[in-house]
Amino acid sequence: MADQTESAAAMSSPRGLPDDQVDRTVRRQVAVRLEGVEVRYGDTVALQDCSFEVARGETVALLGPSGSGKSTALKAIAGFEKVAAGVVTIDGRDITHASPAKRGIGIVVQSYALFPHMSVRSNVAFGLKAHKTDRDAIKPRVDEVLRMVGMLDYAERLPRELSGGQQQRVAIARALATRPEVILLDEPLSALDAAMRRDMITELQRLRAELPDVAMVYVTHDQSEALALADRIAIMRNARLESIDTTERLFTRPPTEFTAAFLGGADVLPVQLVRGAEAGEPIVARYGSVELRASGHDGVAGSAHVALAVRPWAWRFTRTSPANGLEVTVQTEQWRGSVRHVTAEVVATGQRIGVDVPVLVASPLKAETLWVEVDPSDVMVVPADVDEPAGAAVVSATIATEGGR
Ligand SMILES: Nc1ncnc2c1ncn2[C@@H]1O[C@H](COP(=O)(O)OP(=O)(O)O)[C@@H](O)[C@H]1O
Ligand SMILES: [Mg+2]
């Protein structure tokens, strides 16, 4: 088995994505691998040509809008949906068509799914009994996993006597009880209120450290959960894996327009490259009648089709024409926690962009002519989307982000 695992880990990149987008960051032993996986519901293709890997000890978050195929990808790994094409392996074993019970996977879903008439202890013991665990070994293991999730004192209670967060801890303990090699979590925090969700993120981070050999796949539509918990993030879009990389790289060097707009929020400006540059030097690009400089890139060839992406926090309003910026008129304003989110229309193009203003800064006046300025190092350069005009990608990403799940 060890040989098989190592050869699986050493195999070349799975097909379906350009080499430079596939899992270059997996260095540890591969635990889960999907290769060209397709799942259909009747005529609907819910997952298409999906390839990625998860290493032991690694957490990969699947992040994307509702309906993008995240849960379907988890079901393909868990064995809950039939795989129409492609291969799923765990530790090098082909489990594409194995029954769910034979896969050694622990699963946590949004709705807790605890048995209501059974105590916490019985709920957690259930899987161990099903696995024909030695009777004497059950109690110590149940105690151990309940302690891990901080629920040992609640062992004799019924699920209805627990808060949502406590029920979810029990569900996690139940998933851990049989020592699975792979744990799949599907929106595990989305039924909880915001304060409970923050606590549980901290709790999951702590728990992760106690499970150094477990591969985790964490499905969420909430990017703050993905950013907090994942080593790598896979962005899903329209039944496809759009991009996958370390959280930091995906955030700072988004490989597609959609990734830039969806993860962290950014407006994508369609531009013509005026002057290409090596990494570190600013490029110059024409946006409408304006030239913008950008140095947030790793080198751009002279003929490349690129777009610029700017996050709302990177713009600053100015009352005089700036060195690197755009003339705008303010359209709307919305309070969002610690910032006011301003929608501004670019005079040169009519495109609307988002600008975050700290709440303590005096409000920019509506209809007054203003400029927004951006530091070239805060302007990201992304490959232009060939399928869709940039404006359309931004609109769909904005809707997806704000629409929630
Ligand atoms: N049981 C099902 N029968 C038919 N269509 C389904 C079923 N489950 C999911 N779908 C469809 O498959 C697509 C992907 O769904 P899903 O993986 O649940 O998305 P996500 O988890 O990203 O919100 C969607 O278009 C959804 O409507
Ligand atoms: Mg889902």
Image (spheres, helix red, strand yellow):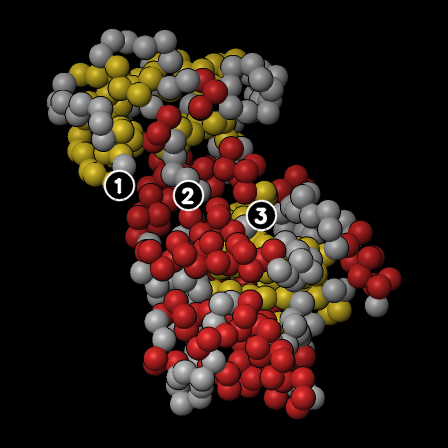
The CA span between labels 2 and 1 is: 19 Å
- Quadrant placement of the N terminus: bottom right
Q: Position of residue 195 (x, y in %)?
A: 33, 56
Query: Horizontal placement of 205 versus 66: left or right?
Result: right
Q: Which residue has dot 2 on it?
A: 262
Q: Residue at x 21, y 16 (%)?
A: 370
Query: Horizontal placement of 44 versus 22: left or right?
Result: left
Instruction: Kindly state the secondary structure of the residue where label 2 is placed.
Output: helix
Q: Give the mark, 3 or 2, whose residue is nearer the N terminus.
A: 3
The CA span between labels 3 and 1 is: 27 Å
Asked whether residue 237 is in view, the answer is: no
| Disc ID at residue 232 | 3
Q: Position of residue 60 (x, y in %)?
A: 57, 54
Q: Residue at x 58, y 47 (%)?
A: 232
Q: Which residue has dot 1 on it?
A: 337
For the residues labelled 2 and 1, say whether their Cβ atoms are less than 8 Å apart.
no
Q: Residue at x 60, y 84 (%)?
A: 139
Instruction: Kindly state the secondary structure of the residue where label 3 is placed.
Output: strand
Q: Give the mark, 3 or 1, whose residue is nearer the N terminus.
A: 3
Where 372 falls versus 81 (above or below)?
Answer: above
Q: Given this view, does label 3 or label 2 mark the residue nearer the observer?
A: 3
Q: Toward which corner of the image does residue 5 lie, by quadrant?
A: bottom right
Crowd band around label 1 with a 10 angstrom C-alpha radius: few (<14), some (14–19), many (20+): few
